[in-house]
Image: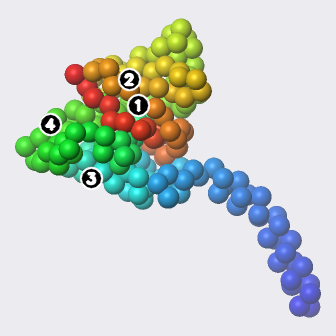
Amino acid sequence: MKKLFVAAFALVAIAFAPQAFAQKMSNPMVGGAEMYPTKDIVDNAVNSKDHTTLVAAVKAAGLVETLKSAGPFTVFAPTNEAFDKLPAGTVATLVKPENKALLTKILTYHVLSGKYSAKDIMAAIKKGNGKATFKTVQGEDLYASMDGKKVKLWDAKGGTAYVTIADVNQKNGVIHVIDSVLMPK
């Protein structure tokens, strides 16, 4: 009886192992945390140790509820290291209540309305003969091109960022992790 129970348990485990493995593989790791496609952008971002500055900025700008809404959104999410590239004191200044409008302008410049996978972005670049233009939620254009096999973004001021982790799917859109903060005019 004990051998029969062990054999039955082993068969059940073997039957479910591929599904569990496939599910595990479909959830990318960002900032040491697994990102779940069943969670929204904010609920996933708060678990990434690489995005604590971005999360603090989103909270200071009052954008949490917006990024928790149905969307869909495409978010180009700068890492903490990306924010560290800004001049000293910039982030501390931006998160002050009196700078909420400017912070909101910068953060919404990193967001597109709609869900654009890396494949969609690369197709737009190809269709545009090497350059794609996207309208951000903030209202200004954001540009994309290929630099070798990497997607390169550049902003209204000529600054650039590279997508370092693409296609982090969320229930209300997709995140693409980037290595620099993009700036509107």
Q: Are marks 1 and 4 in contact (CB under 8 Å)?
A: no
- Place of residue 58 in the rendered image (x, y in percent of width and height, measured from the top left): 27, 47
Q: Secondary structure beneath disc 1? A: strand
Q: Earlier in the sequence, mark 3 or mark 4?
A: 3
Q: Which residue is mark 2?
A: 154
Q: Is residue 77 left or right of residue 53?
A: right
Q: Say if 68 sits above or below 122 in the image.
A: below
Q: CA distance from mark 1 to mark 4?
A: 23 Å
Residue pictured at 82% horizontal, 78% vertical: 9
Q: Which mark is residue 178?
A: none
Instruction: From the image, state whether disc 3 or disc 1 is nearer to you.
Output: 1
- Place of residue 93 in the rendered image (x, y in percent of width and height, measured from the top left): 14, 45
Q: Which residue is mark 4?
A: 101
Q: Earlier in the sequence, mark 1 or mark 4?
A: 4
Instruction: From the image, state whether disc 4 or disc 2 is nearer to you.
Output: 2
- Place of residue 142 in the rendered image (x, y in percent of width and height, measured from the top left): 36, 22
Q: Is residue 13 left or right of residue 85?
A: right
